[in-house]
């Protein structure tokens, strides 16, 4: 199923994100939004460990997600 970027989620659930991609060039972590499946960037504030448990709201779909404290760094964006 393919959803466009304009789709807003009705879910109020805070879904966990377990995988991140380390984007060295943009100096941010990339995650796949668990609601709309778009790739989203989050600011690197120190290490991944510091960000564990942080909650974010996707400004595309308005869905919330939480970065898992045990999130795994993947090697390619396709693995997210
Ligand atoms: Zn989303």
Image (cartoon, rainbow, N blue to C red):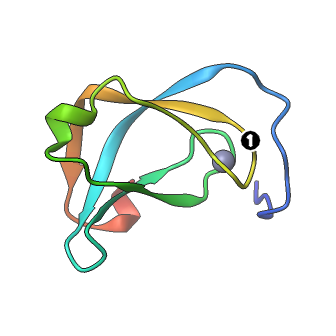
Look at 80% across and 64% down and name the residue there. Answer: 4
Q: Residue 80 location in percent, x, y?
A: 39, 53
**Left or right position of 54 against 69:** right
- Mark 1, ligand 1, within 8 Å: the answer is yes
Q: Residue 33: percent from the left, percent from the top?
A: 56, 46
Q: In which quarter of the image is residue 74?
A: bottom left
* Residue to which mark 1 is pinned: 62
x%, y% of residue 79?
35, 57
Q: In this view, does 33 lie to the left or right of 1?
A: left
In the image as oriented, which residue stretches furthest toward the front?
A: 45
Tell which of 63 and 76 is nearer to you: 63
Q: Residue furthest bottom?
A: 25
In percent of width and height, residue 5 lies at 77, 63
Residue at the spot 69% in from the left edge and 36% down from the top edge: 63
What residue do we see at 36% from left, 66% from top? 77
Q: Nearer the viewer, residue 40 or 78?
A: 40
Q: Locate residue 4 relative to residue 74 in the image: left or right.
A: right
Quadrant assignment, res 1 = bottom right
User: Relative to residue 37, is residue 35 depicted above or below?
Assistant: above
What residue is at 19 percent from the left and 73 percent from the top? 24
The image shows residue 63, relative to residue 14, as above or below, that is: below
Q: Is residue 74 above or below residue 54?
A: below
| Observer-nearest of 26 and 39 | 26
Secondary structure at badge 1 equals: loop
């Amino acid at each position: 199923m393919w959803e466009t970027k304009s789709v807003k989620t009705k879910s109020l659930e805070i879904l966990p994100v377990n995988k991140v991609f380390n984007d060295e060039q943009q100096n941010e972590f990339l995650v796949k939004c668990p609601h709309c499946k778009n790739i989203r960037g989050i600011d690197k504030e120190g290490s991944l460990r510091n960000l564990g448990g942080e909650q974010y709201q996707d400004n595309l779909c308005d869905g919330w997600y939480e970065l898992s404290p045990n999130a795994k760094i993947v090697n390619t964006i396709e693995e997210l």
